[in-house]
Image: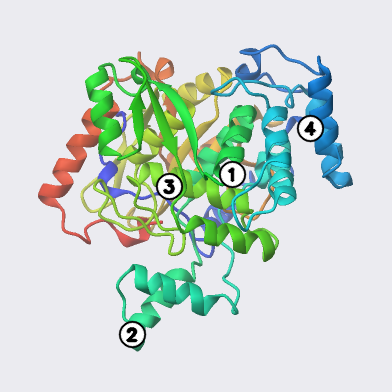
């Protein structure tokens, strides 16, 4: 098993709703282990699971000041019956007053700012407030499904897209290409939506802070990070931040202030989802969150209209590769995340074996879960000849044993149209896992760690030297 970088140039993890997702469901059903009935959100269970992010700040279920009571009551006046109940549940479970955010603001503080301050043009305060409450109350509602562009808006949006990409609208072929680009059927935001899910489920105050900033007129949010959570050496961390082209300022030698923002076309998609959202489609908040995380990983080259990206680390125009995913996770959570590669894959994208045994994989995942961490994994689908034909990112949020003693992983998939957790048996899921994002302390004794930036740079140099522009298998793109 290897840390991030090894083989990562071959993969862009994504999903196709009509192929990959159905295959996973079919395999799991054949094993008799697929279930759509498990709900892991604490609001729907008698026992609230331990979450270290809550333990880092005093768990409060009572408002201590009149100011907090005023904020709470102001928010309630803007909510429907369902959202009011969720607000009360968030207070009872200690989530509403959780302050595990980058600036120590609470969920309540940020919800209040959403409620009373202006939102970006075309966004609704009431809509963003409801989306934020809904998502924090149950992060399983997060989805990566794009919405369609209404017919009455399509000509104007299409013309703008063609001008931006220097396409001649008088040429029918170029117009057809542009139409296909913006009619997104299968999105490549599985990594971004998984990171969004993790932020909402583990860091609700920080999620609310991101929601407030990204939907504000500034459409951005700043975050202070520790340079040691990127690399052991500050100069290497600076190189990494510059390589990903994320705007930042150095507070001092040990800390940096980063600016996160969606791409300029994200607001178009967000406005559409504000007024034309269908069931199982992304909310306006999902649009802006996922665009922001795609921007981080793609070196600020993502386009929400086409769901395509450019960037120096990836020859393909869809999705994020493993190195990009790990960087994005690390800066969003301000944690030293290690992406461990489990599968051996040759230069022809053929699965040829594993870097470690399944028991070690189980132990590392279990150790991470025991620390209160979610584990975002990238898994693969192979054909009869073991050639990888697709890949996808999902999140393991817990585990249990069934009546027969089999290990079951509780997972969240942002591309299955199922707004709650699902279950996969370990015997089905483990052989599919290509890589997993794990805390450094979980894997430091099991692998010969090489820093993420070293492996990422190595892969980039090899890609530029050896790869043709179309060498990344298109079916792996997302």
* Camera-side residue of 402 and 318: 318
Label 4 neighbourhood size at 10 Å, few (<14), some (14-19), many (20+)?
some
Residue under circle 3? 294
Real-space Cα separation, disc 1 to disc 4, in angstroms: 29 Å
Which is more N-terminal, label 3 or label 1? Answer: 1
- Depth check, mark 1 against mark 4: the one in front is 1
Which is more N-terminal, label 3 or label 4? Answer: 4
Residue under circle 4? 43
Mark 1 secondary-structure assignment: loop
Q: Is residue 162 above or below residue 251?
A: below
Q: Quadrant of the C terminus?
A: bottom left
Q: Is residue 443 above or below residue 353?
A: above
Q: Which mark is residue 11?
A: none
Mark 4 secondary-structure assignment: helix
Which residue is depicted at the point 89% across and 45% down? 81
Q: Which mark is residue 173?
A: 2
Real-space Cα separation, disc 1 to disc 3, in angstroms: 19 Å
Tally of numbered discs:
4
């Amino acid at each position: 098993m290897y840390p991030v970088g090894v083989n990562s140039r071959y993969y862009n993890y994504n999903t196709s709703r009509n192929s990959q997702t159905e295959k996973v469901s079919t395999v799991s059903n054949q094993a008799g282990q697929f279930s759509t009935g498990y709900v892991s959100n604490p609001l729907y269970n008698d026992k609230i699971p331990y979450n270290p992010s809550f333990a880092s700040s005093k768990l409060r279920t009572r408002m201590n000041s009149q100011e907090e009571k005023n904020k709470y009551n102001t928010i309630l006046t803007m909510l429907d019956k369902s959202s009011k109940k969720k607000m009360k549940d968030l207070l009872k479970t200690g989530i509403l007053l959780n302050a595990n955010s980058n600036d120590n603001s609470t969920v309540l503080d940020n919800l209040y700012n959403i409620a009373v301050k202006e939102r970006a043009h075309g966004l609704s305060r009431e809509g963003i407030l409801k989306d934020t409450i809904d998502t924090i109350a149950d992060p399983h509602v997060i989805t990566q499904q794009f919405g369609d562009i209404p017919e009455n808006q399509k000509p104007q949006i299409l013309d703008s897209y063609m001008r931006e990409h220097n396409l001649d609208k008088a040429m029918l072929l170029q117009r057809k290409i542009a139409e296909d680009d913006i009619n997104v059927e299968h999105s490549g935001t599985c990594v971004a939506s998984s990171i969004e899910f993790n932020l909402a489920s583990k860091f609700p105050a920080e999620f609310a802070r991101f929601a407030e900033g990204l939907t504000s007129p500034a459409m951005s949010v700043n975050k202070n990070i520790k340079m040691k959570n990127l690399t052991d050496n500050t100069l290497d961390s600076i190189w990494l931040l510059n390589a990903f082209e994320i705007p930042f300022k150095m507070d001092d030698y040990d800390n940096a202030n980063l600016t996160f923002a969606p791409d300029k076309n994200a607001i178009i998609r967000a406005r559409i989802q504000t007024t034309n959202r269908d069931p199982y489609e992304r909310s306006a908040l999902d649009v802006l969150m996922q665009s922001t995380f795609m921007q981080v990983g793609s070196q600020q080259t993502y386009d929400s209209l086409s769901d395509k990206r450019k960037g120096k680390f990836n020859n393909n125009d869809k999705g994020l590769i493993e190195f990009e995913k790990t960087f994005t996770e690390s800066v969003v959570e301000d944690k030293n995340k290690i992406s461990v590669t489990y599968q051996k894959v040759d230069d022809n994208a053929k699965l040829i074996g594993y870097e470690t045994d399944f028991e070690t994989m189980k132990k590392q995942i279990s150790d991470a879960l025991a620390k209160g961490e979610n584990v975002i994994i990238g898994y693969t689908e192979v054909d009869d000849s073991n050639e990888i034909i697709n890949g996808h990112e999902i999140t393991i949020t817990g585990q249990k044993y069934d009546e027969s003693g089999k290990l079951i992983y509780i997972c969240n998939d942002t591309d299955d149209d199922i707004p709650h957790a699902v279950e996969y048996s370990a015997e089905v899921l483990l052989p599919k896992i290509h890589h997993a994002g794990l805390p450094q302390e979980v894997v430091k004794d099991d692998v010969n760690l090489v820093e993420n930036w070293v492996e990422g740079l190595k892969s980039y140099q090899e890609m530029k030297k050896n790869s043709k522009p179309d060498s990344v298998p298109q079916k792996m793109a997302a």
